[in-house]
Amino acid sequence: MPFAQQGPEPLDAVVNVRLTAAEKARLKEDADLAGVSMSELVRRRYFGRPLIAHADAVMIKELRRIGGLLKHLHNESQGAYSQETAAALTALKRYIEQLSAERAS
C-alpha cells in the first residue's frame, strides 16, 4: 500500500525509530517551523536535501514588503528623508541577503 508519491517512486516503506518524548517534541517543533511533516524533515536531513525554514521565507517576504513601503515613502516625500531611507533600505537588503544565504546552506 503506497503512502505518497515523491519523485519517480512511491514512499511505500516504513522505518520505526524510538525517541524520547523530548526528542519527538523537538522533531515536531523543527518540522512545524520548516512547514513539513516529521517524515519529510527526517528524509531531507538524512539525504542532504535542502531544508528551508518556513519562518525565514515569511521573514524575507515581510522585509521585501517593508522595503517597498520605504521606497513609497521616499517617493511621496520627494526625497526629504533620503539619507534615512537609504540607510534603512541598505540594512533591509543586508538582512534579506543574510537570510537567503542561510536558506541556501
Image (cartoon, rainbow, N blue to C red):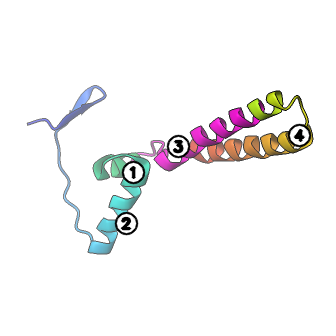
Q: For the residues marked 4 and 2, what is the alpha-carbon distance in whole angstroms?
A: 46 Å
Q: What element carries label 2?
A: helix
Which of pointers 3 and 2 indicates the residue nearer the eye? 3
Residue that appears at 75% across and 37% down: 70
Q: How far apart are marks 3 and 1 (CA)?
A: 25 Å
**Magenta span includes 94:** no
Question: Which mark is on residue 81?
Answer: 4
- The location of residue 31, given as percent across then percent down, is 37, 53
Indicate yes or no whether the magenta region holds residue 52.
Answer: yes
Circle 1 residues within 10 Å: few <14, some 14–19, many ≥20: few
Pointer 2 residue: 26
Q: Which residue is nearer to you in this view: 95 or 84? A: 84
Taking depth in this image into account, of 73 and 54 the one nearest to the observer is 73
Dividing the picture into quadrants, the one containing residue 80 is top right
> Considering only order in the chain, which callout, 3 or 4, is on the residue closer to the N terminus?
3
Q: Give the range drawn in magenta.
A: 45-71
The numbered mark, 1 or 4, whose residue comes first in the sequence reads 1
Mark 4 vs mark 2: in front: 4
Dot 3 or dot 2, earlier in sequence: 2
Image disc number at residue 46: 1
Q: In this view, does 95 lie to the left or right of 80?
A: left
Measuring 28% from the left and 25% from the top, which residue is drawn there? 8
Quarter of the image with the N terminus is top left
Residue type beneath disc 2: Arg
In this orientation, does residue 5 appear?
yes
Q: Which amino acid does label 1 sit on?
A: Tyr
Disc 3 and disc 2: Cα gap in Å? 21 Å
